[in-house]
Image (spheres, grey):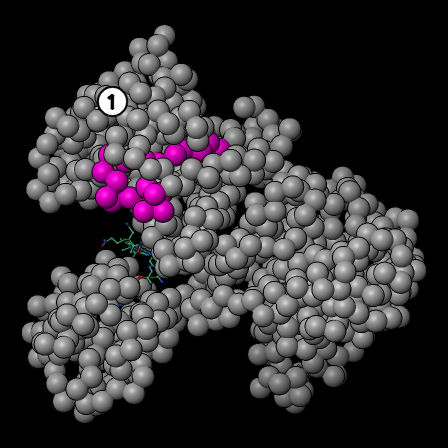
Amino acid sequence: MALKALDIYKLLPKKNCKECGEPTCLTFAMKLAAGKADIEKCPYLDEEASRILGASTKPPIQRVKIGVGERSFAVGDEFVQFRHEKTFNHQPGILVAVSDLWPDDRIQDVVREVRDGVLVRIGTDLRLDGIAIRCESGSAEEFSRAVAAVEAKADLPEVLMAADPGVMEAGLSVCGAFRPLIYAATDENYQGMCALAGKFGCPLTIRAESLESLAKLSALAAKEGAPALLIDPSATTLSDYIKKATAIRQNAVSKTVPDLGYPIFFDTTVTGMQDAALALGVDKYASVLVCDRLSIPSRNALLTLRQNIYTDPQKPIQMNPGIYRVGEPVRDSPVFLSVNFSLTYFTLQGYLEASGVPCYMLVVDTEGYSVLTAVAGGKLNETLVAESIKKTGLESEVDHRTLIIPGYAAPLSGKIEDESGWKVLVGPRDAAGVAEFLEKEWKK
Amino acid sequence: MPMKVDIISEWTGEIGEVTIGATKKEGGSRCAAIVIGGGSGFPFLGGSAPGRKPLIAFEFCDDPKLWSPIVTEFEGDVVNDAGAWAARAEERHRPDLLRFYLTSTRRRGFQEFSQVGRSVEEVLERSTLPLIVEGSIDPAIDSETFLRCGEAGEGERLLLGTAEEGRYRSVAAAAMAYGHSVIAQSPIDVNLAKQLNILLRETGVPHDRIVIDPYTGALGYGFEYSYSAMERIRYAALKGDEDLAMPMISSAIDSLNIKEVREADPGQRGEMAVKWELYTAVSSAIAGASVVCVRHPDTIVPLRSAIDSLWGKTGGGD
Ligand code: B12
Ligand code: SF4
């Protein structure tokens, strides 16, 4: 059961020494209660207090970091079952599988694709995360060759997939310093795998079919000293996965079965329907997803779904209101009115850039709502526009007094003219039409 | 060591059922009367009363000018004849349901109401799947349009759409007069969905003739809100809120018009459309939709495999 801030406060040293980075012990307690601070930041806790607080403020799902450097990622650290209850914190890493039966150049084609492939949405670079190297040869030599082939091309997070601890060690001797994820410890080999995880300081995935065996095995692995764990319920159908993953998440966040409080690993290649399995994994609790090479359409849909599901439902991604410049606008350049929802901003900005006409964007504060949503909800109105023109100093930036408004805001055009004194030109509804619009309407 | 670890289920509420389509025996001409909804668990989690497996509806229209060129080019000439398109969709694409949009009514000053009835009749003649009909979207012609749709489909137990907060009386009236059910659409909000259901009930539409459409934003364009709205609506119902205990329909109608799909590399545009629909539909089914709608014929096969695999052998009553 989670402790309340006051209960936590009672256990703290009450020195108010600020060494934890918080102004007072009480604020530290409040952060701890919200799961937003790390208990180890306070150096003065006595043993009893650390024990109680360590157990109760620890996230119900362990945080695990995979890989090192720029592309490394963290998973776990989740608190809720549904994103609408608060938010999901750490999006799943997606790793593309290669086989040690493949020649180096085939492996490296995949590595290059993962290293360089990017989808830019809402000003963010969306990418796949790493490479899963699968031992299908059974040979330690081939496996380490494959790992070396990957390493030669990129510093990407890796999952090493081999059943034999001897083979695993051969792979780890190539890349063990870069915190790859070890896959997988099972009933048969867990002592060997745990020893490797301890030796190289790598996270370890444990695999078992039933949730009871998973819980048992995770407890054993923790005892053997494995520093960080993921769990794989070895689902082969989507039905099996959704049931097991849901049960794991429920029992973990409610702390009913703390031994299941680890991020979930899902190898989607075994389901025979990779797209659907990836969608399911993103929606329902996967933290590491392994898949075969993805076509661009699959990759884009997947990365977009992941971005959607892992957006904080309490705050749409917003821009700061104000004047933005596209190209190098001058005193007679056109001015476009838009809203501060990031998706809207970046969509419009993309098309304005493509038009090649330098211009200004006047971005007003609609609390992160899109044009249509803001118009429907009354958040975009003439008063806001008139005030924004004044506040931003737009009138000293340009000599003309013409404002181009989004097509969806057409019903407001008269009111904006009256309230601001600016002339209003109604632009197209779809930002894709701005280039043509500028060509026809602005040049006149 | 832990005993048996299982899904923690604390639900007591039950999702209502709605029947779409009527067979010959029931006074219609459909190949089946399909029941959607039911059960008292969350989708795909099994349990003692898991409800039904989600169904796939294929969307088509009577004025292809207002349809995505990705689909009309894929389908070819058949899109110019709604009856033929319906027949072909049923035979080749094999969805569970058809959803027919009367896009012809979306022209300024539309007045050819007799054509509305004829189009619906033609689609009914050329196909046998249970049918969803989408009438006008303009309050000025709602009343006449929905009346014609309702009349043409009398006895067929259509699902008629779409009722919204500001304009639901015409749809409701046509549905009540001719024995159809109604799609109730609200913009991505649990309370608005509930409010509309109450309004519909007050005009006399019974619980078992309402299907909730919580509005599905396209992937990357609001889908995150829709996904959570669906989960919240389903959970509210399972926790006992009867005004939300209707099956849901999900259709991400903007999918094929968004930038990522529309401006995809020409060689990849078709596949982009399919993947966009597939990821959205699978996620909507997971969030609790009973009917998921698609427009690209190639989405249907992978979507069906996905739903079958999600459902599993132990899923329960089909
Ligand atoms: C996601 C969503 C929401 C989210 C909010 C998302 C957000 N951050 O805005 C939530 C769930 C909160 C929401 C709430 C509401 N929503 Co809403 N929502 C949507 C949805 C599905 C997508 C919006 C979106 O992201 N669009 C993408 C962005 C990029 O579009 P955009 O901002 O319009 O920008 C485009 C153009 O306008 C243009 N553009 C932008 N700036 C400029 C500038 C110039 C000069 C030019 C030329 C062009 C241009 O470029 C962009 C690309 O083309 C739409 C449906 C839809 N298809 O739009 C409904 C929709 C907009 N919502 C609607 C409604 C009614 C509402 C509510 C009023 C419901 C309610 N009563 O509570 C509330 C209002 C919020 C409030 N309380 O104030 C209706 C509006 C109906 C209407 N036509 O008026 C819609 C159309 C859904 C529907 N059909 O019912 N909504
Ligand atoms: S470091 Fe410990 S004692 Fe010092 S202020 Fe923080 S909580 Fe209090």
Query: What span is in magenta?
Result: B54-73
Subunit bearing disc 1? B
Q: State which quarter of the image contains the C terminus of chain A.
A: bottom left
Q: Residues within 10 Å of mark 1 (few under 14, many from 20)?
A: some
A209 to A180, vertically: above or below:
above
Is A238 situated left or right of A49 in this image? left
Res B16 → quadrant: top left
B148 to B155, vertically: above or below:
below
Q: Is residue A158 something one can see in this rendering?
A: no
Is B230 situated left or right of B199 in this image? right
Is B71 situated left or right of B120 in this image? right
Percent from the top left, x then y, of residue B314? 64, 29
Q: Is residue A14 something one can see in this rendering?
A: yes
Q: Quadrant of ligand 2?
A: bottom right
Res B206 → quadrant: top left
Q: Nearer the viewer, residue A93 or A24?
A: A93
- Residue at image point 66% right, 48% down: A268
**Amino acid marked by disc 1:** Glu
- Residue at image point 62% right, 85% down: A21
Mark 1 falls on what kind of element? helix
Is A439 situated left or right of B58 in this image? left
Q: Residue furthest bottom?
A: A396
B20 to A115, vertically: above or below:
above
Q: State which quarter of the image contains the N terminus of chain A.
A: bottom right
A91 to A42, vertically: above or below:
above
Q: Nearer the viewer, residue A293 or A103?
A: A103
Q: Which residue is mark 1?
A: B122
Percent from the top left, x then y, of residue A381? 19, 68
Percent from the top left, x then y, of residue B297? 42, 37
Res A107 → quadrant: bottom right
Residue B67: say if magenta.
Answer: yes
